[in-house]
Image (cartoon, rainbow, N blue to C red):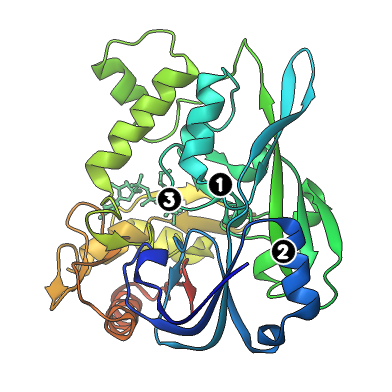
Amino acid sequence: MKLSTNFSLKKHNTFGLAAVANHFVEVETQNELIEFLKNSPLKKDLKLVLGGGSNMLLTKNIDGTVLHVNLQGVCIKEDAKNYVIVEANAGENWHKLVLWAIANNFGGIENLSLIPGNVGTAPIQNIGAYGVELKDVFYSLDAVEIDTGKIVSFTNNECNFGYRESVFKNEAKGKFIITAVRLKLSKPPHQTQINYGAIAQELANKSVKNPTIKDVSEAVIDIRKSKLPDPAEIGNSGSFFKNPIVAEELANKLSEQFPDMPVYPATKGHKKIAAGWLIEQTGWKGYRKGDAGVHKNQALVLVNYGEATGEEILLLANTIIDSVDKKFGIKLIAEVNLI
Ligand code: EPU
């Protein structure tokens, strides 16, 4: 267990925000984590559990303890004829796991290439891209209950996954720390998913006819690199807002008025609308004030060009929410966690 005081979190959040935590505790094994939860006097001030820091906006300094879960390790739990169950510890980098799966010819997460963040946070928001969500390959996870230090497992059903949603954003919020995630990945022949977004076009541009999982991963990487800023260069947290799910009547009314508006199917009686389009139409794409801005290639991504504060980004987000609401009557909801 490593302990630091008055610790800057700048390197621990992909927005690159310089919030300071009174106490920063790093645990590298499940036993260290349980020891912290059962015996550490700092536990009573626990304010934030941090993985890769890729889906949060730190709006202020943290007056208390930040716990950094840095459990490493990947292994194969079950090796069957057509599939494997892979177990990855929470602190593993997500994209590194994707590359490992591809190198071993295990399929299912190639569309989720290059998503920033760690394995342990992937289930919380059910990460998704290009027609695949974590829930499609998720098998189970282990978590430690914060109150008791007890290890609890969750099956796919028990996680109650939805669009950028899970039990860990709802009933179980703030109650568990995820320590390991198990995925069920395919062995060849793989079923690749290339019908969503720009993947098929990207593969055609490269003259790839029967794509392997590696081809799909490379196509996704190229598309993401062309649209989304690399957090190592410009601070960001991916999509800042969720794509809003609205009543079908409102979607139909807006479609008549704005025939180009991208609309996707959703639950019965609802439609999903592209938030990036709504934000661009409201004039925010490429906007910058100080170091806080809206990315020039993807309006759904808010960025920190260097020294922006969390408060400035939050102010920008709230101003965008108000102006989209005024123009379209839709209230955008943040996808990132506001801390
Ligand atoms: N659009 C615009 N202007 C913009 C951005 C998008 O008009 O500035 C339009 C696009 O032209 C397209 C539609 O909106 O017609 C959808 O855009 P895109 O395919 O880029 O996807 P998205 O809905 O903006 C979602 C996920 C991304 C994921 C992509 C690809 C959410 C909140 N975001 O974005 O996830 O990579 O689909 O599957 O669901 C993330 O969660 O951090 C993330 C990047």
- Residue that appears at 54% across and 50% down: 127
Q: Quadrant location of residue 88?
A: top right
Q: Which residue is mark 1?
A: 92
Q: Secondary structure at mark 3?
A: loop
Left or right side of 200 for 319: left
Q: Which residue is mark 3?
A: 116
**Alpha-carbon neighbours of circle 1 within 10 Å: few (<14), some, or many (≥20)?**
many
Sooner in the amino-acid sequence: mark 3 or mark 2: 2
* Mark 2 lies within 8 Å of ligand 1 (Cβ measured): no
**Alpha-carbon neighbours of circle 3 within 10 Å: few (<14), some, or many (≥20)?**
many
**Alpha-carbon neighbours of circle 2 within 10 Å: few (<14), some, or many (≥20)?**
some
* Mark 3 lies within 8 Å of ligand 1 (Cβ measured): yes
In the rendered image, the vertical position of residue 31 relative to residue 315, given as above or below: above
In the rendered image, the vertical position of residue 98 relative to residue 115, given as above or below: above
Sooner in the amino-acid sequence: mark 2 or mark 1: 2
Question: Which mark, residue 32?
Answer: 2
